[in-house]
Amino acid sequence: MSSSSEDRYRVRLTRRALFRMTGGATAFAALAAACQPTTTAPAASSAASAPAASGATTAPKAGGTAVISLGEPDTLGFGSRSLTFAYIRSFIANGMVRLKYPDMTVVEDLATYTVSSDGKTYTFNLKKGVKWHDGDAFTSNDVKFTLELYAHPANPAPLNDDFGNIDGAKAFKAKTATEITGIKASPDQVVITLVAPSPSFLTSVATTTILPAHILKDVAPPDLSKHAFARKPVYTGPFKVDEWRSGESITYSAFPDHFKGRPNLDKVVQRIFPDPSTALAELRTGGIQQGFVNADQFDEFASDQQRWATQQLAGSTGWFLSFDMTSKDLPFGEKTFRQAVSYAIDRNALIQALFKGRADKSYSLSSPLSWVHNASVTKYDYDPAKAKQLLDDLGWKPGSDGIRVRDGKRLEYATMVTSTSKDWFLAIQPMLKAVGIGSSKVDTVDFGTWISRLNVGRYESTVNGWGNFAIDPRADLAAHFRSPRFGDATGYKNDQVDQLFSQASKAASRDDEKKLYDQLQMIAEGDAVYVYLFRPQLLDVNLKNMILPQAKIQAEIYDGLPRWEIR
Amino acid sequence: MGRYIVRRVLLMIPLVIGISLLSYAVIAFAPGDPSQLLADREQMTSETYASLRVELGLDDPLPVRYVKTMGALFTGELRSFRTKQRVIDAIGERLPTTLALGALAIIFGMALGVAIGVLQAVRPYSRLDDAGTLVSLVGFSIPHFWFALMLVMFFGVRLRWLPTSGIRPIGSSAWNPIEMAPYLVMPTIVLGTGLLAYVARFVRSSMLDALHQDYIRTARSKGLRERLVVVRHALRNSLLPVITIVGFLLPFLIGGAVIVENIFALPGMGRLAVDAVFARDFPVILTITIFSAIAVIVGNLIADVLYGVADPRIRYG
């Protein structure tokens, strides 16, 4: 549930009941009407400004400070593992290539590239005039330095498959070579030779931030995270980091010499809120100018078009029920049982009740927006009669209290939830009960406990959320369907699927790769590994005079920060 | 008294060691694995997981981990699992905020608490006394987070008199008391109200005791004005126990700061602690726990010493 850390920072409210009071405090409003100040938005002038999409028709206006809300990263330097950094990275740093949102394909960034016909040689032609935030010129040495860091013998992290695939990287890691022979750097070019063709190599390059050799070359890899660079880095992106005040804010300013041109805004202040209700209060009072709210609060903003602009983005997290299929006492290993559960869930009702309709039904692990997605996988939609039929066929007969029984054993089990998913499961519970599936316990734990128990043999069932738009979509599929895998939550293993994974990792072209992933998802999703529920939309709210690029997913909002504009 | 202080300070050593052992055990046995929280699962492989555990030193036997961690803590080299920042630096960044908030809350709580308590004691069992009791009762029972959200909603969102969160205006990074004052009003009220209630109850009862003493009757009978009797004779004597409770209230303030700092997004130690707990950032949790424990022990010691300073009859043996 990579998204759960993200959830903590998003403007969403868990103490919903309390805020219904706040939202419904119109009595207070009447009381305070005399003291009501004018809104901070220049309502009259902003009425004339165009909505988000049409920023391109006139020349963008430069200047201004945008105050936004985003979580606190672990580090801004080398080796960050947080999703927040992946968002920040998109406006302060560059890779040689970058991910294009929302389909997650790879496009040029610091370099244009060509691939040889055998798929083993990548030629990156570096763009000219690229400067680091400190004014130094970006060179091919920076690229070589960065890639060698990942294979550096003193780097405690193991070499990943994609960089281990660079010719000579393993020898360098094993200290039998003093450099990676497969990386040839000339002034305008970096040529990388792979041992075997790999379609995921470019994605790995895209998620690798190029570091400045002139600052970091003498720092031992284990000390990089302790270097001052970790909190005040120097990159090549459109914004540079001015100051990071722990627990408070990070301030960025426009980098005028950015190779794609200066961003519109002068400054961006990222405020860090530990509690979503605080961020909501700041959004209401103008303390932040952009944020994400939950479905309960969205109408309040969407209905005030004089003051606010809103966008409904596709959810990056898909939620589903997950079972320990290795269980000996419970029928989770039976595909028909999992199908029955899926048929029992009324997704439309859940989406209406929990998100006021602002969520999308989900039938598969991959996001419908990602290039790997296969839209034609089997969908097990709401059909309670069919659910009952399947359970009957499995030999589970309704007992006196409606809960089904087979061989003297009742069909009920425990579900592990977090504070985010608890309400959701409570809404699902009666749907399961309606077809005769009982719940023995709803176990609410914190995220840290949840993730450590999300392994076969350590839980019965849970509500799981998955997916983010910062990493390779292939990794998402592999983390769930390929075996063996780290932190196996289901015990799912299908040899045919595993074979397709290994074929896909050697595919000669993107088309071939896509076909293999399509096939693989047909089989894995057909096995009903998970009971998919919904993808809650992300609801963006910003002051009307702030023009944001039209986005489909959250990552695009931050990726597009250089194009934000204050009118 | 010097010998007394030295003995108390020496006694702190085994106490701190005991606390560190206990906190370490609690953290080590709590559910949740820090290495699993450092990276997303889809990016984790068995190799990266193993290397993370080595990096964090989680594969060492528990006693070895304890000794290594404590050694690093006292040489200042202990680093956060998550940010790799020195824990001592992280605390150094956050401590001024928490100290400022705590000091303001104590001043607010003491000033108002003493005033209310004295007024109640002067007119016991009157309507004024009942009102004071009600204020104390409400102040003591009101949950910090609810009170904070109500203040934010009313003074921040509806009236817009005060900023709803943060510690200073955007763009400012200085410690400027005039700029920061509006940001600290609501946090001080929330944190100080519990203290106020406690102090008021304490002052009331100790004032009632004092007002029935012989020396008060003497003071009155020699024709002293009632105001002077109350302030100079009764209050001075009854403040004695109040000094001690401030020392004992330190843990209460630390606990309250956790909630108040989170709701008002103040960059203090309480927030650092909460974030560390969620991330299972053992070095940070441990340091803050030990740090707070020492603060409480020292607070108690200071209270005991002040008690002797305020009341010459007390002898330390």
Image (cartoon, coloured by chain):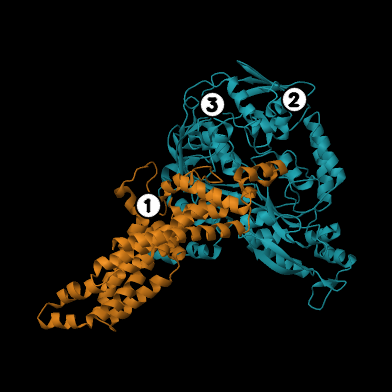
Foreground pick, B287 / B136? B287
The chain carrying label 1 is A
Dot label at residue A218: 3
Residue at 74% x, 29% y is A165
Q: Earlier in the sequence, mark 2 or mark 1?
A: 1
Chain B colour in the picture: orange
Q: Report which quarter residue A433 is drawn in.
A: bottom right
Chain A colour in the picture: cyan
Residue at 62% x, 33% y is A155
Give residue A369's position: percent from left, percent from top: 70, 42
Give residue B119's position: percent from left, percent from top: 25, 75
The chain carrying label 3 is A
Q: Mark 2 points at which residue?
A: A194
Mark pair 2, 1: CA separation: 62 Å
The chain carrying label 2 is A
The answer to whether residue B297 is seen in the rendering is yes
Give residue B35's position: percent from left, percent from top: 63, 48
